[in-house]
Structures are given as C-alpha cells and as structure tokens.
C-alpha cells in the first residue's frame, strides 16, 4: 500500500470537505451527546462546566482528529494499514499491524453494543408513533425490550440497515447518508428545542444547564468528566476517523475539517441539552443519565405534552439518525480493513461485519449484559486503542512527516506550537484518559 499512497483508495474518496465533515459529525454525534452530556452539564457546574469542556474539545479536536485523518490520508488505508505504515518508518511494520488490531477490535466492540442500543431507539420510535409508548408504563416497555432476546427483530433491522447503506459503496454511500441524516438530526432537535422553550416551568431546566456554579471549577471531578466527555464525544478511537481520513483527497484542509467537526459535535450536544432538560424540569421529573433518561424519563415527559406522538417521533427519529450514522462509521472501520487486508469484496466484507455484530450482539441483548460489554469496551479497549494511535502517529511516524501531511490543502501555515501541543499535551492527556477511565470506572 505504501507505493500506492498517491493513488485513490479502492473505495473511492469523498467529493468535497463538506461531505467529509458531515460524515465525521455523523460518526461523532451519538448517544453520549444525548443521554450523558445534558446531565453532566448541569451536574458539574452548568455553564461553568463548558469552560473545561470547550478547552478539551479544542485540544482533542484540533490535534487528535487531525492526527487520525492525516495518517489515514497518507497511508491511503484504514486501521490495520495505517498502523503498519507508521511503524514501518521504524522498520517494524509487522508490529504496527498487530497493534492495529486493538483499536479495530474497539470499533467492532462498540458497534456490537451500539447496535443493541439503537435497536431500542428504533423500537421506541415505533412505540411513539403507534401510541404504545403512552398506553404502557415506560419502565415496563424498557424492561421488555432490554430483556434477554427481547428485541431481536429490531436488532436485525438496525444491522441490516447499516449493512445495506454501506453496501451501496463506501464513500458515496456514507456521504449521501450523512448529507440527509445529519441536517435532519439538527433540524428535528431545533424544532424540539423551540417547542420545549414554551413549556411552563422550562426555565428551571435552563437554570440547571446554564447558571454557572463557579465553585465546580475548583473540583477535580469537573475537569476529569469534562475531559472524558470531550474525548469520547469526538469519536477519537484510533480507528474510525482514520478510515474516513483514508477517503480524503489531498486538497482537503485537515485541521480546518477537524475544527469544523468538533464545532458541529459540540453544537449537537448543546441542542440535545436544550431539547431535553427544560422539558424534564417543566414536568417535575428528576433528571437522569444513561438509558434511563431516553427510555424511561422522556416517555413520561412526552406523555404530558400536546401532540405527544409527534414530538416523541421527532425525538426518537433524530436519535435513530445519530445512531445509524455512528454505527456506519464503526462498521466501515472494520469493513475497510477486511477489504484491504484480506482482499474481500465490498459485499463480503459488509456482510461479515454485520454478521459478526449480530452474532455477538444477540448474546448481550439483556440490558445488564450490554452495559457490562460497553463498560469493558469503553473503559479498557477504546481509550487504550486511542492512546496507541496517538503514540504511533506523533512519536513513531513522527511530527516531521505528520506536519507535511497536515500542510497539504492549506493556504495558511499551521498554528505555531501545533507539534508541541500534540506531543506534550495531547498524547499525555490520552494516557490520562485511559488511566482515569479505569480509576473512575468510566469517564465518557
């Protein structure tokens, strides 16, 4: 693959930077933006929490995303080939190839658990449209679909949808899907946020979210949780964004695309907060986080709103869009490596990836099991893979070659101190995220 780095990827390339950014935003915007960020924002100081959060988003977005995009574009291949490329510069390509399996497993592992959760979202969309959501206790409905093998049909539909969309072609399919689903996601959440603003009692939710509690900036936990939220929200996994980078043309401005991805991801998180928390407080329901917020708390909120079916459908449809676009990125990381390394056809690679995700996912459909699975993947595998990626790119491949790749497609020189920020701030922070995730039992 090294001799062919000037050629286009076998799966083609994104048509322009806008399509690329939308694809990356689709990958980054996920459940963490929707069920965790709004709660953390209020829990850790309201508007004060945004200060450390935005600092970490800026660091991780600029140098973290740029690193993964750049190595993918230079190697012109995804996870396995990119790690092999980095380490080949030191004569240890085989070691790099072996290391690459760790973040690749992280992508597949998240996809397996994520597909289960998205299947709950899709079923909730159906329950909202049909009114089942409002005729049955939310707790009972969630218990049904999160039971062992309690949601198989919807689970199959989610994976089949992701596989089908990827089967139409990598870059063309991904770009077209995100050009539709991402704007729709933002539009639906804007509509929800505007509607919620007119609810009596919504002001209490805004106070929870945005009245700054400055004393929280003196608490270590605030900075730890802001760092974890920023890191995981941007989908820095050492795998998924690398494969999207491999589909980039040489005239694309990577740092600019990275900043735009971080900005839109942050906007999505804030929109979710504006749509959810004021409504929760308006009806006097205790705010929560995690699955309970989406599948138990919010159905109670929608039940008390006029046009309850419509707004429940808006919400779960937008979350379905976010879930599918994220799932596509996770699957694509695996599919591309299967194609490039094992010479599988596009069809065979996507079917194998979807089949693996479903086969394992059926065994963890139980809510407790999927929680254990996702904790293992997100606490141990993904942050370790991201750390390996940061080290492989900035220290093994090296800043000199990295800098030359980042300068392609730019009309301005890189920010002064970019390399120092990456090597001496970002890489150590990636190590801190990994260690503190284990200490805290999860921070993202």
Image (cartoon, rainbow, N blue to C red):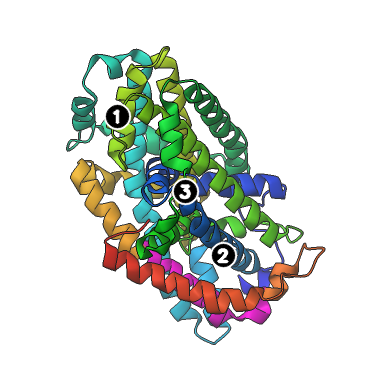
Asked which secondary structure carries label 1, the reply is loop
Dot 1 alpha-carbon crowd within 10 angstroms: few under 14, some 14 to 19, many 20 or more: some
- The residue that mark 3 highlights is 212
Q: Is residue 258 above or below residue 130?
A: below
Q: Could you tell me if residue 102 is visible in this image?
A: no
Residue found 58% across the figure and 40% down from its top:
173
Residue found 48% across the figure and 55% down from its top:
235
- The residue that mark 2 highlights is 59
N-terminal of the two: label 2 or label 3? Answer: 2
- The residue that mark 1 highlights is 285
Specify whether 62 is left or right of 52.
right
Asked which secondary structure carries label 3, the reply is loop
The x and y percentages for residue 74 are 65, 68
Task: Point out the stretch of residues depicted in magenta.
Answer: 382-402
The x and y percentages for residue 422 are 58, 74
Q: Nearer the viewer, residue 302 or 374?
A: 302
Looking at the rendered image, the disc whose residue lies closer to the viewer, 2 or 1, is: 1
Quadrant of res 401: bottom right
- Image quadrant in which the N terminus is located: bottom right
Dot 3 alpha-carbon crowd within 10 angstroms: few under 14, some 14 to 19, many 20 or more: some
Looking at the rendered image, the disc whose residue lies closer to the viewer, 2 or 3, is: 3
C-alpha distance separating marks 2 and 1: 36 Å
Q: Which of 329 and 63 is in front in this view?
A: 63
Asked which secondary structure carries label 2, the reply is helix
Q: Is residue 126 above or below residue 173?
A: above
Secondary structure of the magenta portion, mostly? helix
- Is residue 399 within the magenta segment? yes
Q: Nearer the viewer, residue 32 or 78?
A: 32
Looking at the rendered image, the disc whose residue lies closer to the viewer, 3 or 1, is: 3
Q: Is residue 94 above or below residue 206?
A: below
């Amino acid at each position: 693959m090294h001799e062919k780095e000037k050629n286009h990827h076998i799966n083609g390339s994104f048509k322009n930077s806008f399509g690329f950014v939308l694809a990356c935003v689709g990958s980054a915007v996920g459940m963490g933006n929707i069920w965790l960020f709004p709660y953390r924002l209020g829990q850790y100081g309201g508007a004060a929490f945004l200060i450390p959060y935005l600092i970490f988003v800026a660091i991780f977005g600029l140098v973290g995303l740029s690193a993964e995009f750049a190595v993918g574009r230079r190697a012109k291949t995804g996870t396995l080939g990119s790690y092999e490329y980095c380490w080949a510069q030191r004569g240890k390509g085989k070691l790099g190839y072996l290391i690459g399996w760790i973040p690749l497993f992280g992508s597949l592992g998240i996809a397996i658990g994520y597909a289960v959760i998205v299947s709950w979202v899709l079923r909730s969309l159906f329950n909202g449209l049909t009114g089942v959501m409002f005729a049955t206790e939310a707790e009972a409905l969630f218990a049904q679909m999160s039971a062992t093998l309690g949601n198989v049909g919807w689970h199959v539909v989610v994976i089949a949808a992701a596989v089908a969309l990827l089967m139409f072609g990598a870059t063309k399919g991904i770009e077209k899907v995100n050009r539709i689903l991402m704007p729709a996601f933002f539009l639906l959440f804007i509509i929800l946020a505007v509607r919620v603003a007119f609810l009596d009692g919504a002001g209490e939710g805004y106070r929870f979210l945005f009245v700054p509690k400055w004393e929280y900036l003196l608490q270590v936990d605030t900075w730890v949780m802001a760092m974890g939220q920023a890191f995981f929200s941007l989908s820095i996994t050492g795998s998924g964004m690398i494969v999207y980078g491999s589909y980039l043309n040489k005239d694309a401005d990577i740092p600019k695309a990275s900043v735009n991805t971080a900005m839109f991801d942050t906007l999505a998180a804030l929109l979710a907060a504006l749509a959810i928390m004021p409504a929760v407080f308006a009806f006097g329901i205790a705010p929560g986080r995690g699955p309970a917020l989406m599948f138990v708390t919010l159905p109670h909120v929608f039940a008390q709103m006029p046009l309850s079916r419509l707004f429940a459908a808006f919400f779960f449809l937008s979350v379905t869009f976010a879930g599918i676009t994220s799932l596509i990125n996770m699957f694509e990381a695996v599919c591309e490596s299967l194609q490039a390394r094992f010479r599988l056809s596009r069809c065979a690679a996507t079917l194998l990836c979807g089949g693996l995700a479903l086969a394992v996912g059926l065994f963890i459909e139980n809510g407790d099991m999927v929680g254990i699975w996702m904790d293992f993947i997100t606490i141990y595998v993904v942050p370790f893979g991201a750390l390996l990626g940061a080290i492989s790119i900035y220290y093994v491949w090296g800043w000199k070659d990295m800098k030359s790749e980042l300068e392609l497609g730019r009309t301005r020189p890189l920010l002064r101190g970019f390399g120092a920020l990456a090597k001496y701030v970002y890489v150590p922070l990636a190590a801190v995220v990994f260690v503190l995730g284990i200490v805290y039992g999860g921070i993202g």
